[in-house]
Amino acid sequence: MQIARLIAEESDRDFIWSAYSSAYQKVVERQFGAWEVKPQKLAFDEKWHQGGFEIIALNGTYVGAVWITNEEGFIQLRDIFLAPEYQGQGIGTQVVREELEKARAAGMPLRLRVLKQSHAIALYERLGFTRCGETATQYWMEAV
């Protein structure tokens, strides 16, 4: 399995939106009862304009994206999502492990937020993340 990460360009925006919406729709429906395209697209556009997305490619095929930011005192895994047909194959696990290694090498914790209804919580816990806070809808998780 050859996983590559490529800096996202404006021409990748439609692919990333498609992967984002297909990856998040079911969890958003579980969490909030419905997926409303307009507010979800507005939220995505806001994230996109901040920049920094990377395409995740498997054997040359685009399968998802990741968005990492360096914050003061920690690294934040802001988003990681794979098109549903590529989930459960170890791709996300490998990308998160790479980020854990980078954070540890920098001597910083890796933090993320995850919806409480997300199946990814089990993955994060297997990789050593622990809950360090929460809102009504999300858990904050951290690995050191």
Image (spheres, rainbow, N blue to C red):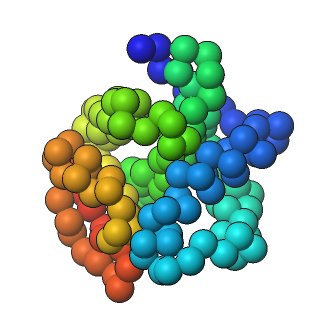
Looking at this view, name the residue that lies furthest to the bottom: 136
- Residue 115 relative to residue 46: left or right: left
Residue placed most toward the observer, 105 or 14:
14
Location of residue 120 in the rendering, given as x and y in whole percent from the top left corner: 33, 53
Residue at horizontal 55%, vertical 41%? 83
Residue at horizontal 20%, vertical 42%? 127
Position of the N terminus, as image quadrant, is top left
Residue at horizontal 21%, vertical 69%? 132
The image shows residue 34, relative to residue 52, as above or below, that is: below
Residue 111 appears in view = no
Residue placed most toward the observer, 130 or 2:
2
Residue 27 appears in view = yes
Location of residue 119 in the rendering, given as x and y in whole percent from the top left corner: 32, 56
The image shows residue 53, relative to residue 134, as above or below, that is: above
The image shows residue 34, relative to residue 1, as above or below, that is: below
Location of residue 39 in the rendering, given as x and y in whole percent from the top left corner: 69, 76
The image shows residue 9, relative to residue 60, as above or below, that is: below
Indicate the quadrant where residue 37 lies: bottom right
Residue at horizontal 29%, vertical 77%? 134
Location of residue 38 in the rendering, given as x and y in whole percent from the top left corner: 75, 73
- Residue 130 relative to residue 123: left or right: left
Q: How many marks?
A: 0
Indicate the quadrant where residue 96 lies: top left
